[in-house]
Amino acid sequence: MQSKILAGIRVLVTRPAHQIQALCDMLEETGARAICLPLIAIEPIPVSQQVETQLRQLSQISFAIFISPNAVEYGLEKLRSLGAIPKTLKLVAIGQASALKIQQILGRTADIYPRDQYNTEALLALDDLQANYVNHKHIIIFRGCGGRELLSDSLKQRGAIVSYAEVYQRIKPQYEAQQLANIWTKQPPDVITLTSNEGLMNLVSLLDGQYWQQVRQTPLVVVTEKMARNAKKIGFKNTILIANKASNQALLDSVLKWAKITTQSI
């Protein structure tokens, strides 16, 4: 049984709506009160005609890389709508969560994914994506609109022929003023969990003004050094802990760590 060290502590959880419940449940098992405020909404989008033409010729593609569980969900949905997915197509996941999503949808294990760190750098370090395996191979990367170019650029440097299939977009959710007031004036969170820089910026955008002075004094749990630096630049003044992964368990562990630090300092 989880420690009840979080009893009575209010934790703001900001994952997208369709991913938020698991972390909320885990927090509440420790005695915390999870406050759900998704800061990113996910919407599927149609692929371009050029990409659809490519997807109809999967036999010419060697690797399909999925950079998030959302990319898996909407990417595989598109692929399945066009016919069977050939076993010769190597399915590559950015991390364990994406690999699990492939397993759930297809009943097939991802061919390639990092076991420890779940990011582009860890994926690029895998033996199966080095130049001797990807040189002259066609690779398609399933992702949301925009994002880092490191993966594509690195694979091209290794001789691969790379294209994108952008299958979803992230948008900022809209909230009524009363919804925000119910959180920040009645029982404000003791700590906020954030899993992306986009979510961080959306939080600031939503609460800049009336609640900003209160928000900036709230401790944060983030998932990268870059997020921590950005939060400090924006003006967050309290403790900022960096979870070692973006997984629910890593976020929970960091909230527990924050609670222990806070308790010891009292």
Image (cartoon, rainbow, N blue to C red):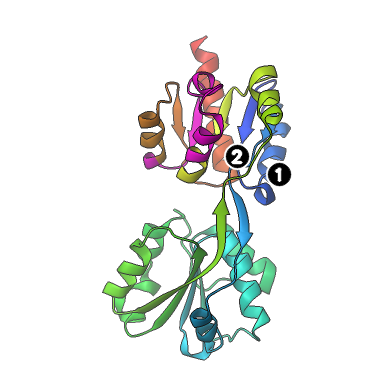
Q: Nearer the viewer, mark 1 or mark 2?
A: 2
Q: Residue reaching furthest top?
A: 266
Q: Residue at x 56, y 87 (%)?
A: 56
Q: Which residue is mark 2?
A: 14
In the image, taking residue 95 as reference, residue 85 lies left or right, namely: right
Q: Residue at x 58, y 60 (%)?
A: 69
User: Magenta includes 213?
Assistant: yes
Question: Which amino acid is tagged 2?
Answer: Thr
Q: Residues within 10 Å of mark 1 (few under 14, many from 20)?
A: some
The range drawn in magenta is: 201-226
Which quadrant of the rendered structure holds the N terminus?
top right
Give x and y (percent) for residue 129: 37, 73
Question: Which amino acid is tagged 1?
Answer: Gln
Q: Residue at x 57, y 46 (%)?
A: 172
Please tell me which residue lies in front, 248 or 175: 175
User: Magenta includes 99?
Assistant: no
Q: Residue at x 62, y 24 (%)?
A: 189
**Badge number at residue 4:** none
Give x and y (percent) for residue 193: 55, 35
Please tell me which residue lies in front, 248 or 201: 201
- Residue 153 lies, with reference to residue 229, above or below; the image says below
- Residue 252 lies, with reference to residue 65, above or below; the image says above
Q: Earlier in the sequence, mark 1 or mark 2?
A: 2
Picture quarter containing residue 139?
bottom left
CA separation in Å, label 1 and label 2: 10 Å
Give x and y (percent) for residue 201: 47, 39
Q: How many marks?
A: 2
Q: Secondary structure at mark 1?
A: helix
Q: Which residue is mark 1?
A: 21
